Amino acid sequence: MKKLLVISMMLVATLTLAMAQPGGGRQQGTPEERAKTQVDRLTPVLTLTADQKTKIQAIEVDLNKQMDAKRQGVQGDREAMMALMQEFNKLREEKYKPVLNADQFKKYQENAAAQAQQRGGGGRPQ
């Protein structure tokens, strides 16, 4: 009986420590990792060329670094975070436009709008 109690306490302690790990269960990754994920996600949708992949990757790394720096200042303020996300989504569109051709940019905007709908209407401006 004593062994069972000790094992149970160790299990509870282990679970408590595991749940206390930072990150809230969702790993952000480095700006470079997030940029690669974005390029990998966009490539089949937009049929990106190698040159476009390189340019989009650079744009995303830059935006991710800027976003990380600004995100610290709005931590916990949902409305400020939403405004910041809208600002960065608009900036992303401005930077993508010269890199993508007209058809790709249209597809990008349609894809962004569809994702915003899935999230409940928020996200990128129309």
Image: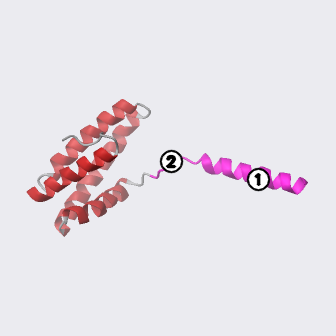
Q: Are marks 2 and 1 in contact (CB under 8 Å)?
A: no
Residue 93 within the magenta-colored segment of the rendering: no
Q: Quadrant of residue 120?
A: top left
**Residue 112, percent across and down?**
24, 49
Q: Earlier in the sequence, mark 2 or mark 1?
A: 1
Q: Residue furthest right?
A: 1
**Is 15 part of what is drawn in magenta?**
yes
Identify which amino acid the numbered label 2 is placed on.
Gly
Image location of residue 80, percent across then percent down: 34, 31
Front-most of 120 and 31? 120
* The label number, if any, that marks residue 10 in the structure image: 1
Which residue: 33% across, 35% down?
Answer: 82
Q: Quadrant of the C terminus?
A: top left
| Tag shown at residue 63 | none
In the drawing, does residue 82 fall left or right of residue 112?
Answer: right
Residue 47 can be seen, yes or no: yes
Amino acid on which disc 1 is placed: Met
The residue under the point 25% across, 60% down is 42
111 up-or-down from 71: above or below? below
Residue at left offset 27%, top offset 53%? 60
Report the side of 5 relative to 49 (left or right): right
Question: Is 120 displayed left or right of 113 in the figure?
Answer: right
Q: Which circle marks residue 23 in the picture?
A: 2
Residue at 22% over, 64% down: 53
Circle count: 2
User: Which region of the structure is painted magenta?
Assistant: 1-27
Farthest residue to the left: give it. 102
Q: Which element type, helix, strand or loop, lies under badge 1?
A: helix
